[in-house]
Image: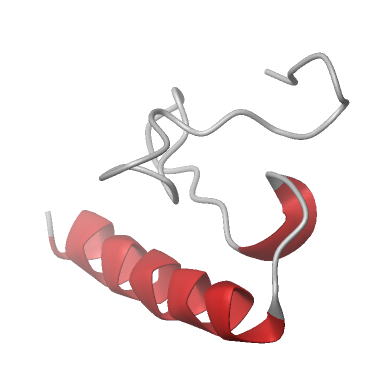
Amino acid sequence: MTGEEGFLRSRDNLGGITASDRKGIFFAGTCTGPKTIPETLAEADRAALSVHEYLKG
């Protein structure tokens, strides 16, 4: 589940940056690579929305 640099790999680097290959697991921030604070906050928002959608079914 990690890439060559040791960071977690998201499903895809464009639309699914917060999604993992495992159902119900979402990423945000620097676990997938170096990020700025605004990038990290944007991913956190997206990951929280993804968790909400996942829990709703």
Give percent across and percent down for residue 43: 48, 69
The quarter of the picture where the N terminus appears is top right
- Picture mark count: 0
Left or right of residue 50: residue 41: right
Image height of 57 relative to 6, above or below? below
Residue at screen point 74% across, 18% down: 3
Give percent across and percent down for residue 52: 27, 71
Image height of 29 relative to 18, above or below? below
Residue at screen point 49% across, 43% down: 25
Residue at far left of view? 57
Q: How does the figure colour the protein chain or chains?
A: secondary structure
Residue at far right of view? 6
Left or right of residue 36: residue 55: left
Give percent across and percent down for residue 7: 79, 34
Left or right of residue 8: residue 21: left
Residue at screen point 75% across, 50% down: 31
Give percent across and percent down for residue 6: 87, 26
